[in-house]
Amino acid sequence: MKTFARTIAAACARCLCYGGAALAVASLLMAAPSADAASPRTDLLSGAGNGWLASPNGVDGWIPAYGPYPNPVTMPNPFLNAQGIHAKLMWYWPGPGVPGAGSPPTTAYFRHQLHLEAENGQKPQIVALMAADDDMTLTVNGIPVGSYQLSAHMMPNGQPAAVAIDMTPALRLGDNQIDIRATDNGVYHWVFFDSYNINASPEQVLVQRAPAQISLVGDKDDFHPGDLADTTPKSQHVLDLQEKLQPTPAIDLDQPAVNQSVGLTHDISVPEGAIITSASVKLHIRMTGDIVDNDVILFNQSTITDEGLSTRVITLHDLLGFPPQAGATYDLIWNLAKTPLRNVASPIVTGQPDLVANLLSMLVSDKHLDVLLADDTMVDYSELSITYTSISAAPGDLNNDGAINRDDLNILLLGLNTLASGPDDPRDLDRDGRITALDVRKLVASCSQPLCM
């Protein structure tokens, strides 16, 4: 058996060890004719525009397959190898608009016609990686070639493993027809068929989409007081700070603040091995005191001396870019990748902050974020948003969504001209210890789409 066929057979054995289909597929591979090693093919890739037709019943109503079919959890990993993943998730969808969760039908049929010419006097070998949510059967020229059940190929990380299928024994020179029947009784139906990355590890073809983690403390009710959500969780650090702020008493959310403090804590839980690449806090606030232009935020690294002096603080003036005004309401955005800090709180805020700090590594080490506003700031809610990636993600994929695009560029720009979080900071693409324009250039050069759209 050729080296290539042996490699794919081993991959099949790993992927299909859950069921009897392993023997069937492996036998197909081992029985493959002594054709030249399979070559990547772009003519059979699943998705729109590649010749696949879809039908709700397999008899009529054939239309071009819809792709990429939206799925918030699983997506192809385009940076699996040097060639990238070119296939897309596809399904039957006649429109209008974009399909949503549970969009019908639950069973769909797919068909692809291809014409094969001899290569070096022999029938070419065609191998593909396939997967589906939840079940699919593959037929070539009326001959059953393989099947797939998501439940039998779910990996420990919750992602599906693709299956390698050698279609060569059922193919013939001349005209051929590939048919797929797929069924999903849940949501976000899809079929994946990749004839390009035949040397890829089937376990790495599909990856989990990593959305931003959102933590909301309070409720977005435009300062309506007295709700259960207005009593916030607080770390011991916040409680200690508030005690030292006395005689400035602590209050809950949605209560007017005049020489009073509002404190809360966001708990942070990201997957093991995740690397935080951006974090921001949105605070919906109202200035309810008479002297508000020196109001500050205290956080994990803030302290209060025995004399009552607050150190290492964030002023609202620095976050807003102008002094807050009494009676005004703001949506205040605190970018933790680039936070302006002042060494001490002072009665008058003047000049530039003492330093601009990257606080992302603090979130990883502390596993929480303390937010304490003092002393004339009424708070409706605090919303923490975090994006993260993994060490296995492609360089530049800063949110682990399998693509390098404007979303990743925006993450990089949020930390521009700051120190990296450490030697493994994925934003520091040139590994010089800083997030600079050189990192931006390297990311843009790696973008999946022109102009990094």
Image (spheres, rainbow, N blue to C red):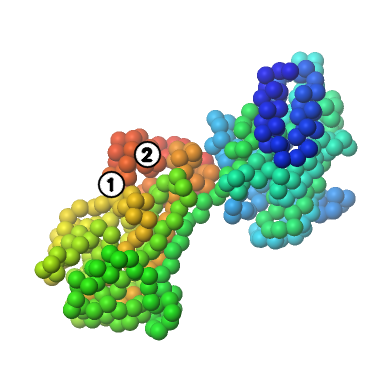
Q: Secondary structure at mark 2?
A: loop
Q: Of tags 2 and 1, which is closer to the observer? A: 2
Three-letter amino acid code of the residue under disc 2: Asp
At label 1, which amino acid type do we have?
Thr
Asked if 302 appears above or below 288 in the picture, the reply is above
Residue at mark 1: 418
Residue at left 61%, top 33%?
201
SS of the residue under disc 1: strand
Residue placed under numbered mark 2 in the picture: 424
Q: Is residue 376 left or right of residue 415?
A: left
Work out which quarter of the rendered image holds the N terminus and state it: top right
The first of marks 2 and 1 along the sequence is 1
Image coordinates of residue 265 in percent, x first then y, are 35, 66
Circles 2 and 1: CB atoms closer than 8 Å: no
Residue 210 point in image, percent of width and height: 52, 51
Left of 29 or right of it: where is 205? left
